[in-house]
Amino acid sequence: MGWSLGEALQPLSDDPVGRWRISCVIQGMDAALRIVVIAPDLSIDDPADEYAVRQAERSRSLRIGLLENDFNLVAVLPADTFLQERLAQLQPDMIIVDAESEARDALEHVVMATRDERRPIVMFTNDEDTSHVKDAFAAGVTAYIVAGLSSERIRPILDVAMARFQHEQGLRQELAETRTELEQQSAELRARMAELHDRKIIDRAKGLLMQRQNLTEQAAYDKLRKTAMDKNLRLADVAQRMLDVADLLG
């Protein structure tokens, strides 16, 4: 189950400065980019767990930074099997993956959830192991950001990510249109070749009738056409059968 905007900002609302920041960041959100963040639960079971506390604070900083930059944070969701359904309901403009040690698992869930409806995916992580960055881009990640959570960096990062995604989508569209055009041209070429082949078969059959039955070209054609209509066959098929019989009889 995802977390609401209020839950994401609740720790800030306990002090005057936090309330002021919330009032500032929510202005103008109606027309802002709709963003869904994929992140682990912020709850901390053990306050003495420094890693969990650090992760929760880092994740909360990302969400605050999004709001401070006038982005519309519509939901924070876990990377689970229900993710595709939730994204289909929310229809975000961009997906942000906030992960560290679980980055690869979270990314796999996001990629699977967006395979039928592509969206820009931006991954924020503190994991400095970049050995799987290439795989992340190949899987569909638009931007892979290590230690980039400062508020002043978020907007340019997301702006560039969106521009890159739109450019790539344009290239994919051009590629799809080119592929469709080539397929149409190939189909037209095959049709023309088949038509030419049929004409050659019909001409051979007409020549055979003209030679063996002493018919004019028009009379031979009319006879082939009548036979095709009587037998409910294509003219070329009748012509081919006639040639096959002639070949058998010698």
Image (spheres, rainbow, N blue to C red):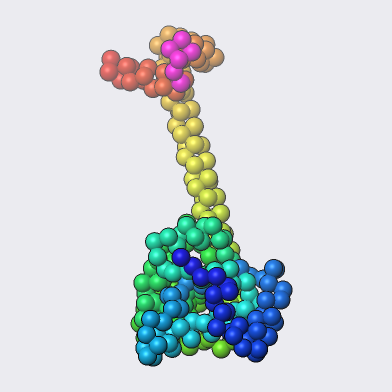
Q: Where's residue 223, x and y in %?
A: 48, 11
The quarter of the picture where residue 28 lies is: bottom right
Q: Which residue appears at 32% of the width and 16% of the height?
A: 245
Q: Nearer the viewer, residue 216 or 190?
A: 190
Q: Locate residue 66 relative to residue 1 in the image: left or right.
A: right
Location of residue 233 in the rendering, given as x and y in whole percent from the top left corner: 44, 18
Q: Is residue 103 above or below residue 225?
A: below
* Residue found at x 40% / y 65%: 80
Horizontal side of residue 190 vs 131, given as left or right:
right
Q: Position of residue 215 (x, y in %)?
A: 48, 10
| Residue at figure coordinates x 46%, y 83% from the top left | 56
Report the number of numbered marks: 0
Residue 84 visible in the picture:
yes
Q: Is residue 111 above or below residue 44?
A: above
Q: Is residue 68 above or below residue 74?
A: below
Q: State the image quarter where residue 30 is shown.
A: bottom right
Res 142 visible: no
Magenta stretch encompasses residue 233: yes
Residue extending farthest front: 14
Residue 197 in the magenta stretch? The answer is no
Q: Nearer the viewer, residue 78 or 114?
A: 78
**Residue 17 in the image, given as x and y percentages of width and height:** 65, 90
- As displayed, is residue 85 above or below residue 166? above
Q: Left or right: where does residue 93 sit relative to residue 238? A: right
Quarter occupied by the C terminus: top left
User: Which residue occupies 43% across, 88% down?
Assistant: 54
The residue range painted magenta reads 229-234
Of 58 and 207, the residue lying toward us = 58
